[in-house]
Amino acid sequence: MATRVAIISIAVENPDSVRDLNRILHENGEYIIGRMGIPYPKRGVSLISVVMDAPADAISAMTGKIGMLSGVTSKALYAKL
């Protein structure tokens, strides 16, 4: 199956959702190339970038699950490869 390269941007405003977020990321670990998290306590948010090489449906499913978490927003940006 063909894969796509994408970067997922995640904004976490509810710290209670971090455990579920990490579970979702762990479940998709085989597709994750790397991730970077930046806490920004002054504004009460953590920003996370996740780079993936995965089938498009796996990327969509993961971002959808993340977006359903309370106080968490996610968006995917696909490379034009």
Image (cartoon, rainbow, N blue to C red):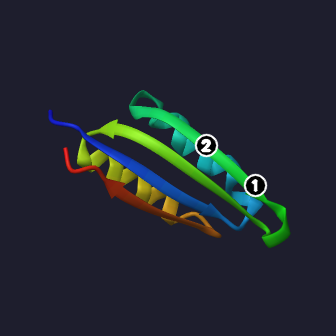
Along the viewing direction, whichever of 74 and 26 lies nearer the viewer: 74
Q: Contact (CB < 8 A) between labels 1 and 2?
A: no
x then y, percent, for residue 55: 25, 41
Tell me the quarter of the picture where residue 3 sits. Answer: top left
Q: Is residue 40 left or right of residue 10?
A: right
Task: Pick the quarter of the image with the C terminus.
Answer: top left
Q: What secondary structure is marked by label 1? A: strand
Residue kind at label 2, given as amino acid type: Met
Marker count (numbered):
2
In the rendered view, would you say 36 is above or below 38?
Answer: above
Tell me the residue that label 2 is attached to: 36
x then y, percent, for residue 61: 35, 53
User: Residue at left 21%, top 50%?
Assistant: 80
Circle 1 residues within 10 Å: few <14, some 14–19, many ≥20: few
In the rendered view, would you say 38 is above or below 4?
Answer: below
Q: Is residue 6 left or right of residue 26?
A: left
Q: Is residue 60 left or right of residue 40?
A: left
Tell me the residue that label 1 is attached to: 39
In the displayed orientation, state which residue is furthest to the left. 1
Q: Is residue 11 left or right of residue 34?
A: right
What's the distance in space between the residues labelled 1 and 2, CA to CA? 10 Å
In the displayed orientation, state which residue is furthest to the front. 80
User: Residue at left 65%, top 70%?
Assistant: 71
Residue kind at label 1, given as amino acid type: Pro
Circle 2 residues within 10 Å: few <14, some 14–19, many ≥20: few
Tell me the quarter of the picture where residue 76 sits. Answer: bottom left
Q: What secondary structure is marked by label 2? A: strand
Along the viewing direction, whichever of 57 and 9 lies nearer the viewer: 9
x then y, percent, for residue 21: 60, 50
